[in-house]
Amino acid sequence: MNIAEIVFPIPLNKSFSYQIPENLKTEQCINRRVKASFGNRTLTGYCIAVKENSIQQNQKQLKEIIEVLDKEPVITDEMNKMAAWLSQTYLCSTGEALSVIVPVSLKVPKRKEKPKKEITKKENPVFKVTKYQQNALDEIFLAIDKQQNINFLLHGVTGSGKTEIYLRSIQKVLEQNKTAIFLLPEIALTPQFIKIIKKRFGNIFALWHSEVSLIKKYKIFDSIQKGEIKIVIGARSAIFLPFENLGLIIIDEEHETTYKQNNKPCYCAKEIALWRAKYNNAVCVFGSATPALDTYKKCIDGSFKLLELPERIDSKPLPKIEMVSLKNVNLKNSVLSKKVISAIKQALARREQVIIFLNRRGFSSTLMCQNCDAVYQCPNCSVSMVYHKYPEVLKCHYCGKEIKFPVKCQKCGGKNFRIFGVGTQRVEEELKKLFPFSKIFRLDADTATSKDVYRKVYEGVKNEEYDILLGTQMVAKGFDFSRVSLVCVVDADTSLYLPDFSSSERTFQLITQVAGRCGRADIKGKVLVQTNFAQNYALVNAQNYSYKNFYEQEMDFRKQLQYPPFCDMAKVTVRNKQDKKAQEVAQSIYEILENKILKLNYQISLLGPCQNYIAKLNGSYRWQIILKGQNEQIRPLLKELINIKLPAQTYINLELNPTDLL
Ligand code: ADP
Ligand code: ZN
C-alpha cells in the first residue's frame, strides 16, 4: 500500500500523509484534488506526491483518502513549480497557492458532454493597420517568431487601437499552434468586446470571470488541458489556467489594481504573467494609456520594451480637458458648477450624451483650509489626514497619529476648513432637479450587482435610452459610446488627496481614462474637471496628455520620500470581530517583527499598528502594520508569520507591495 502526500489550503506550510484506498492505483491519485478528513473536518486538498509505505508510518495507522475528485491529473509540472514559487513570493502555504491555481471549488460535471459544435467561421476586420500599429506588431511578431521571452509595454493613448494589436498577436501565436491568455480588468469584459472576439476566433476561446459557473469553469479547465480551447480571455485568475504551449500573455489596462488579489494569497497577476512567460519562452504584452509607474520604470531600466501609439486612429484629436476651478466659487449646496451645468445643457440640447464621473472613494473626507487651500497632512507621513466624525478627530491611516478637531491650518494658521467628499446619490438628486426630462443611469457599487447590469447600461446608452450616465470608476473604463460628447469629473480632489502615496498616480490615470470615453467617433469630445487644485501636477499633466512629465515628477516625489518603486512595502492586516482583540494581536505581531528586525539588523521601517482606513468591514475590525524596505529582507521577516498560531477568530493577511495602504 502506498502513501499520498497531501497539502491543504490552510495556513500550515506542510504536507500530510494519507493512505491511498486499496481500489486505487497511485497513478490515479497524484496531482489530483482529493477529499480527506483533517481534524474533525473534511477538506479538499491536493495530492502532490506518492511514496512507498515504510514500516514506521504503518504503525501510525494513517487515515485513508476519502475520495479522489479528478479522473485526470489537474496539476501539471508547471503548476507545481508555480505553486512553490507563489508560496515563496507571496508568503502562503503550498496548499493555499494551489487553491488559486486549481480552485477546490471547480465542479466536475455529472453528465457526459455532447461533442462540441463545429468551429464557427472566423472573420477578420477590413481595415489596414496604422503605421504605429504596424511598428508595434513588427516587434511583437519578431519575438513570437523567435520564441523569445520578451516583455512589451504597449503605451497607447485611448482609442489608439491597442485591441487590434492584441488580437493580431493572438492570431499570430495560434498560427504557430500555441496558446494565449488575455487578461482584462473584470469591468472591461463588456458585451461589445465579447462580440468582437467571437467574430474573430470562433469556438476556440473561452471567457473566464467571477460569474462563470463552477461547472462551466471545470469544463473550460478540461478543454484547455485537452487542447480544444486555445485562448482564454478573462479576469485576474485566468492567469493560472493550465495551457501547455503558452505563446502569449496580454494584460490590458495593466495599471489597474484589480490584477492584485487582496486576500490570501495576495498574488499579482502581472508578476505571474512574467513568471509564466519566462517559463514558457513566451511573449508578454502589457498595455495601457497610463502605465503603472513601476512598469514604465522597467522600460527605462531595460527589462521591458516600450512600444508607443501616440495618436488616436485616424489622428482623431483627444478630447480637450478643461479644469473648472472651484476656488472662490460659491456652489450654494450644489455639487455642480455653473459651467458644468451649462455644458450638460448644451450637450443634451444637441441630443448628445453625457458621462458624469464621481470618484468611488468619495466617502473619504479630507480637510482643506479655506484661506490658503492647504490640505491637512500628517506630520510623520506626508499623506492627507482623514476626517472622522464620531468622535471628531483627524487620523493618519499610515502611522495612526490622531489629532483632535478643531485644528489650525499647518500653513497659515487659519481656522476655517472645507471638508470634501460627496456620494453618487447626492449628484443624481441634483441632476434630476436640474434636468427633469433627461434619463439618467446611475452605475456604482450599489447598482452594479451583476454583469447583467453592465449589459443593460451598455445597451441602454448605445441605443440612446439614456442621456446621462452617472457613476464611479466603472464608467471610466472600457466603454466605447459614439454619442458621448461630454465627460464631467465632479470632484478630482477626493482621489487627489486620499491618504495614500499613490493618490496622484491614481488621479492622473482616472482623469486620462475617463476623458478617453468621449469624442471617440465623429462628435468632438470635451472634458470638464471640477477641482480646487487646478495647478496640481497630476491634473495639469492629465490635461496636457503628458504622461512622461507626470512620470518624471511623480518619480521625483517617490524618490524623495522613499516610496515604491524605490522601495518595497508590505501590509500586515489583522482581523477580529472584536476591535480590542485585533489591536492586541496586531501589537504583539508588531513586537515580534520589531525584535526580529533589531536582531537581524534589517533596514526595514515599521509603521503602526493602526486602524485600517475602513476600520470595520463585514463585521470585523482591522488593524494594520506597514513595512517599508526591500523584499529581500521583508520576505524572510514575514515568513515567520505564515505558520504563526493565532487566537481563535483572528485572521491575518500579508500583502507585499499592496496596491494601496488604505
Ligand atoms: P484602445 O484600446 O487603444 O483604446 P481600441 O482598440 O478600442 O483603442 O480602438 C479604437 C477603435 O478604432 C475601435 O473601434 C477599433 O475597432 C478601431 N480601429 C483599430 N485599429 C484601426 C485601424 N487600423 N483602422 C481603423 N480603425 C481601427
Ligand atoms: Zn502619519
Image: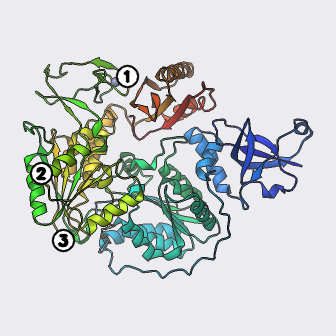
Read off the residue under disc 3: 522
Which element type, helix, strand or loop, lies under badge 3? loop
Percent across and percent down for residue 567 are 42, 35
Q: What distance separates the C-alpha of mark 2 from that of mark 3?
A: 28 Å
Query: Tag 1: residue type?
Result: Gly
Residue 171 appears in the picture as rendered: yes
Q: Residues within 10 Å of mark 2 (few under 14, many from 20)?
A: few
Read off the residue under disc 2: 434
- Please say if the residues under marks 2 and 1 sit with CB atoms less than 8 Å apart: no
Choose the circle earlier in sequence order: 2 or 1. Answer: 1
Looking at this view, is 437 or 87 the one in front? 437
Read off the residue under disc 1: 400
Image vertical order of residue 307 relative to residue 257, above or below: below
Percent across and percent down for residue 366 are 25, 31
Residue 625 appears in the picture as rendered: no
Looking at this view, is 54 or 568 the one in front? 54
Which element type, helix, strand or loop, lies under badge 1? loop
Percent across and percent down for residue 211 are 49, 57
Looking at this view, is 455 or 330 the one in front? 455
Q: How many marks?
A: 3
